[in-house]
């Protein structure tokens, strides 16, 4: 194994879990998340010697992941029937229910808006970083972010998920 | 709902994370496949007519302002291998190696190079640099690199017409909009009007008759035919199941049929060039069909399985589009090449062995050991030697008459820009 492969393996071992979780919040299922993570890391492997010389390796990984996710969405478009309402979910324990409701709420966002929300509030990227990642203006990121939050708020408040979250947090703190 | 509570909700959404698979190892394997595919992409365009190329040495200086004069008296000489490499400081070079003597020439400074291709006459070699979005022309006579030629962002593949007059460079763009194919005149080095295609191209091939160019855009699941006479894209052909792990193509020498290996669906799709119609998919070439090569007589298509543990290459009879019995090769097969005389197929694997296969009998001979991290294989026009490039920076010659490896030639610490054989 050459030094560059060893270097890449070390990076991938450290970054894979975080990338996979981010991919999951973008796509909503773990199988696709694993595929997207593998695609991201494989693309980085191809140009690793060049990428590893850059300072912002994780930013590069985020960009590659988002590109892979958006490309995947485009491929699926036309093969999936989009509906204006959320699917019914089976009755599950409360912890699973929160997860399902959050994922269902995220699924109502258009792909780029979902990227903005996840990268801003999960990956902790700045407005400028997300704008750079998507190749759009900071104003666009701000408006997509605000609209995304509004939409999520409306769905989650209607569902009462936030109330459940608050109760859980209060009981944990208390 | 404020940002803090949203963050907490997102944390809870990923709380029930299932165990992960061997994601690092599978990413490295997929990355190796992508690297190899890039090499195959660059070489496939020349492979189909390599058999009829006569090796010539041309003593004509590069002419950057107009068409070059034809050579006065071609002199037979061994072809030259050109290996593209980059160092850790962002510099890069193309190193010539005599395919006759193995002598290594002085590297030609090129800047970073991600792929390399030669004109059929071997007088000009092109490399591209993805990051700067440019192509460089290298005169193999003067052993100098020209100025960068700007193309559309993020070039991913090159192909040269059989007459050697035009280089086509496919660019992925920004992955959000259309892709592009930029024609470049080999005579003048001038980029012409780019042709827009659906999605982001990942692979490209020119038919041996020089009439059609096919571009695969895996992001859009489209195969776009481009008429080279008209210089325009024809209606794209949707190919279901194309993924980032697929997109290899091969064209029969008579230019009648294009084969597309569909890694994700485990099949090979034949497409009639004249009509653009896809025929029934061919099964039986393993779970992950990858690189392909067609015998010079056009009778057999060999498909390498790079998708699973099957370790096979499968011959497909072109006349009937049916798969024959698969042939077992080494673990993690990576690259394949056929001798121009059509007698032997060589299949290299990541473990560093090359399996010779008799085309007449579809039987494998004893494996030949070369360096690990094998990248690609090329064969000289006279079929006497095969050269194996490995990512560790070595080129290993194989004498085809005896199927024995000679002493490896060290080029650089690592090589990731590919190799091309210029007649």
Image (tube, coloured by chain):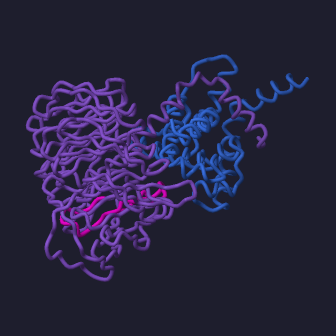
Chain colours: A blue, B purple
- Judging depth in this view, the residue of B55 and A17 nearest the camera is B55
Q: Does residue B173 show up magenta in the picture?
A: yes
Q: Is residue B198 visible?
A: no
Give the x, y percent position of residue B294.
Answer: 18, 43
Residue B157, located in which quarter of the rendered image?
bottom left
Q: Residue at x 86, y 22 (%)?
A: A171
Relative to B70, say whether A122 is above or below: above
| For residue A49, side relative to residue B300 (left or right) | right
In the rendered image, the quadrant that contains the C terminus of chain B is: bottom left
Question: Quick one: which residue is furthest to the right in this view?
Answer: A174
- Name the quadrant containing residue B141: bottom left
Residue in the foreground of this view, choosing between A87 and B3: B3
Q: Residue at (83%, 27%) from the top-left corner?
A: A169
Residue B300 visible at all: yes
Instruction: Residue B314 in the image: state x and y as whole percent.
Output: 22, 30
Residue A33 magenta: no
Task: Give, as a single range, the part of the protein colored magenta.
Answer: B159-181
Tell me: B300 left or right of B151. Answer: left
Residue visible at 55% across and 44% down?
Answer: A65
Percent x, y of residue B232? 26, 66
Quarter location, residue B122: bottom left
Q: Is residue B50 left or right of residue A57?
A: left
Q: Residue at x 44, y 58 (%)?
A: B113
């Amino acid at each position: 194994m050459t030094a560059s492969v060893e270097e890449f393996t070390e990076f991938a071992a450290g970054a894979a879990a975080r990338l996979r979780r981010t991919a999951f919040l973008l796509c909503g299922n773990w199988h696709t998340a694993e595929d997207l993570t593998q695609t991201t890391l494989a693309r980085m492997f191809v140009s690793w010697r060049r990428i590893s010389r850059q300072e912002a390796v994780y930013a590069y990984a985020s960009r590659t992941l988002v590109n892979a996710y958006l490309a995947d969405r485009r491929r699926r478009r036309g093969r999936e029937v989009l509906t204006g309402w959320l699917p019914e979910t089976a009755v599950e324990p409360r912890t699973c229910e929160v997860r399902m409701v959050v994922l269902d709420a995220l699924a109502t966002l258009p792909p780029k808006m979902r990227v903005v929300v996840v990268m801003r509030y999960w990956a902790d990227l700045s407005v400028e970083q997300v704008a750079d990642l998507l190749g759009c203006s900071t104003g666009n990121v701000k408006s997509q972010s605000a609209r995304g939050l509004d939409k999520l708020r409306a769905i989650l408040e209607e569902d009462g998920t936030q109330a459940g979250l608050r109760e859980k947090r209060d009981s944990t703190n208390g | 709902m404020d940002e803090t509570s949203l963050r907490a909700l997102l944390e809870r959404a990923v709380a029930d994370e299932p165990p992960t698979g061997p994601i690092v190892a599978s990413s490295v394997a997929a990355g190796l496949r992508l690297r190899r595919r890039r090499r195959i992409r660059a070489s496939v365009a020349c492979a189909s007519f390599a058999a009829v190329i006569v090796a010539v040495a041309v003593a004509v200086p590069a002419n950057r302002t107009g068409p070059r004069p034809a050579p006065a008296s071609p002199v037979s000489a061994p072809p030259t291998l050109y290996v593209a490499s980059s160092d850790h400081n962002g510099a890069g070079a193309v190193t010539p190696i005599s395919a006759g003597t193995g002598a290594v020439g002085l590297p030609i400074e090129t800047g970073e190079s991600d792929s390399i291709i030669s004109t059929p006459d071997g007088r000009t070699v092109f490399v591209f640099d993805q990051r700067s979005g440019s192509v460089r022309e290298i005169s193999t006579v003067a052993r100098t690199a020209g100025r960068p030629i700007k193309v559309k962002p993020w070039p991913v593949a090159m192909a040269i017409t059989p007459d050697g007059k035009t280089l086509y460079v496919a660019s992925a763009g920004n992955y959000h909009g259309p892709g592009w194919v930029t024609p470049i005149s080999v005579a003048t080095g001038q980029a012409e009007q780019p042709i827009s295609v659906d999605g982001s191209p990942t692979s490209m091939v020119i038919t041996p008759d020089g009439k059609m160019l096919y571009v695969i855009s895996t992001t859009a699941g489209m195969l776009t035919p481009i008429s080279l006479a008209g210089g325009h894209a024809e209606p794209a052909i949707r190919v279901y199941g194309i993924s980032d792990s697929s997109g290899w193509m091969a064209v029969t020498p008579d230019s009648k049929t294009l084969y597309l290996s569909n890694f994700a669906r485990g099949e090979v799709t034949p497409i009639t060039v004249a009509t653009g119609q896809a025929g029934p998919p061919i099964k039986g070439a393993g779970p992950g069909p990858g690189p392909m090569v067609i015998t010079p007589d056009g009778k057999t298509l060999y498909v390498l399985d790079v998708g699973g543990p099957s370790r096979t290459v499968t011959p497909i009879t072109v006349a009937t589009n049916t798969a024959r019995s698969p042939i077992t090769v080494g673990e993690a097969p990576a690259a394949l090449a056929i001798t121009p005389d059509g007698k032997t197929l060589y299949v290299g694997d990541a473990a560093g062995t090359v399996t010779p296969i008799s085309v007449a009998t579809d039987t494998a001979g004893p494996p030949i050991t070369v360096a690990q991290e094998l990248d690609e294989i090329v064969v000289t026009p006279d079929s006497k030697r095969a050269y194996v490039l490995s990512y560790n920076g070595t080129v290993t010659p194989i004498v085809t008459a005896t199927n024995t490896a000679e002493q490896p030639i060290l080029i650089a610490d690592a090589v990731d820009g590919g190799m091309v054989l210029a007649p």
